[in-house]
Image (spheres, rainbow, N blue to C red):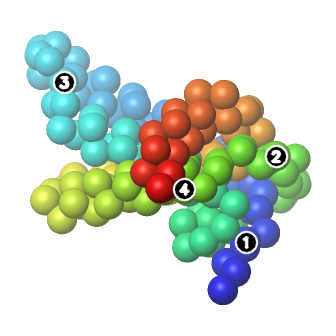
């Protein structure tokens, strides 16, 4: 069974909504940190948001499978919301992202990352689950922007390929 997925494309409106949501979450976190007297940040909250963001980014970089299908559908929904919110002229699509070079070992590492995220999801309360989901939506939509794919293919993809490769050698 081949689950190859046509790579999704992000529109200008989808990019605006994704960046706006990321900026809103960041400003809200900094303001809460300032209001609480600059105490050390809540690392659990930051960890779950970052793990959702990373999983969303990696799912956007997958060439096929259920994660790529989920990222493709999130991008379609983000584009629809962004085009509605930002108005006329925002439906133009950005250039499609090039394949990131995720190999079989990297796919296995993505699967292990997904298992860790599922365990983290099951052990979290509803507020942390919302942060994981929000990070996943932002990561999967921003993961389709060309510059983000380029940066991830230089940094994250070799790391994932190196982690997963020893497990597939037999």
Horizontal side of 144 relative to 51 (left or right) equals right
Residue at (18% x, 38% y) in the render: 44
- The quadrant in which the N terminus is found is bottom right
Q: Which residue is mark 1?
A: 5
Considering only order in the chain, which callout, 4 or 3, is on the residue closer to the N terminus?
3
Residue at (13% x, 59% y) in the render: 123
Question: How much space separates mark 3 and mark 4, taking CA atoms?
Answer: 32 Å
Q: Which residue is mark 4?
A: 107
Considering only order in the chain, which callout, 1 or 4, is on the residue closer to the N terminus?
1
Question: How much space separates mark 2 and mark 4, taking CA atoms?
Answer: 17 Å
Q: Which residue is mark 2?
A: 98
Residue at (32% x, 60% y) in the render: 115
Q: Which residue is mark 3?
A: 41
Question: How much space separates mark 4 and mark 1, taking CA atoms?
Answer: 15 Å
Considering only order in the chain, which callout, 3 or 1, is on the residue closer to the N terminus?
1
Question: How much space separates mark 2 and mark 3, taking CA atoms?
Answer: 36 Å
Quadrant of the rendered image containing residue 124: bottom left
Considering only order in the chain, which callout, 2 or 1, is on the residue closer to the N terminus?
1
Q: Is residue 84 visible?
A: no
Image location of residue 66, percent across then percent down: 55, 73
Question: How much space separates mark 1 and mark 2, taking CA atoms?
Answer: 14 Å
Question: Which numbered tag is attached to residue 166?
Answer: none
Question: How much space separates mark 1 and mark 3, taking CA atoms?
Answer: 39 Å
């Amino acid at each position: 069974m081949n689950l190859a997925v046509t790579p999704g494309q992000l529109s200008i409106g989808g990019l605006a909504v994704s960046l706006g949501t990321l900026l809103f979450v960041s400003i809200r976190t900094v303001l809460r940190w300032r209001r609480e007297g600059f105490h050390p940040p809540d690392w659990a909250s930051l960890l779950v948001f970052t793990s959702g963001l990373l999983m969303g980014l990696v799912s956007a970089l997958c060439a096929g499978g259920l994660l790529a299908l989920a990222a493709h559908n999130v991008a379609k929904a983000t584009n629809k919301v962004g085009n509605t919110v930002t108005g006329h002229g925002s439906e133009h699509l950005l250039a499609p992202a090039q394949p990131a070079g995720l190999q079989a070992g990297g796919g296995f590492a993505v699967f292990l990352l997904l298992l860790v995220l599922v365990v983290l999801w099951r052990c979290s309360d509803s507020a942390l689950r919302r942060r994981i989901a929000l990070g996943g939506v932002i990561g999967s939509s921003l993961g389709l922007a060309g510059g983000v794919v380029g940066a991830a293919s230089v940094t994250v993809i070799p790391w994932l390929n190196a982690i997963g490769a020893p497990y597939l050698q037999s």
